[in-house]
Amino acid sequence: MMDEVKIYSRALSAQEIEDDYISAGPDGISSLSFEDGQLQAYPNPFDYSTTISYKTAVAGKVTISIYNLTGQKIQSLVNETQQADNYSVVWDGTNATGGFAGSGVYFYTLNIDNKPVAMNKLVLLK
């Protein structure tokens, strides 16, 4: 079965993304929204390590992942069930095999129960 594919010729607003992809699942039942999680990294840009702070408003299986510009997951920082609370995790600029990820722009995501709730950009300078 193939999901519906939409192609846009412009950047979507946060509200459009939430309306199209997050608020309602395939069965029309409301799921997680951007308000269910918050995500921030400091320092950003960084050279040795950055602390990613996040808040979950609902309990569930939480994942924090790092992606390169091509969308390839290069590191998983958190992959566990957590209660609604404030948390933080440090990324030292390494990939999943322990090697240096390389200078550049990365995206980090917060998912709860395999549903995206937040995404931000990181800049690694070395």
Image (tube, grey):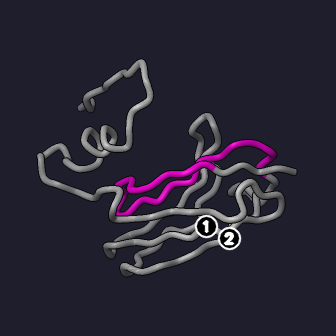
Tell me which numbered mark, 2 or 1, is placed earlier along the sequence: 1
Taking 59 as reference, is 98 left or right?
right
Which SS does the magenta portion mostly show? strand
Disc 2 to disc 1: CB gap under 8 Å: yes
Q: Quadrant of residue 83?
A: bottom left
Residue of label 2: 90
Q: Residue furthest left?
A: 28
Relative to 94, residue 125 above or below: above
124 vs 38, left or right, is: right
- Report the side of 68 relative to 6 (left or right): right
Q: Is residue 62 above or below residue 71?
A: below
Query: In the structure shown, which secondary structural element does the residue marked by tag 2 occupy?
Result: strand
Q: Residue at x 44, y 55 (%)?
A: 118
Nearer-the-camera pick, 48 or 62: 48
Q: Residues within 10 Å of mark 1 (few under 14, many from 20)?
A: many
- Amino acid type for the residue under numbered disc 2: Val
According to the picture, the residue beneath numbered tag 1 turns out to be: 52
Residue 14: % across, % down:
37, 43
Seen at 39% across and 33% down, the residue is 12
- Give the magenta part as a residue range: 101-121
Instruction: Decide which of 115, 99 is in the foreground and name it.
Output: 115
Which quarter of the rendering shows the N terminus? top left
Amino acid, disc 1: Ile
Residue 21 rendering spot, x and y as whole percentages = 29, 42
Residue shown at the point (50%, 68%) measured from the top left = 79
Q: Residue furthest top?
A: 9
Question: Percent position (x, y) of residue 101?
Answer: 76, 50
Q: Nearer the viewer, residue 82 or 56?
A: 56
Label 1 sits on a secondary structure element that is: strand
The Cα atoms of the two marked residues, 2 and 1, are separated by: 6 Å
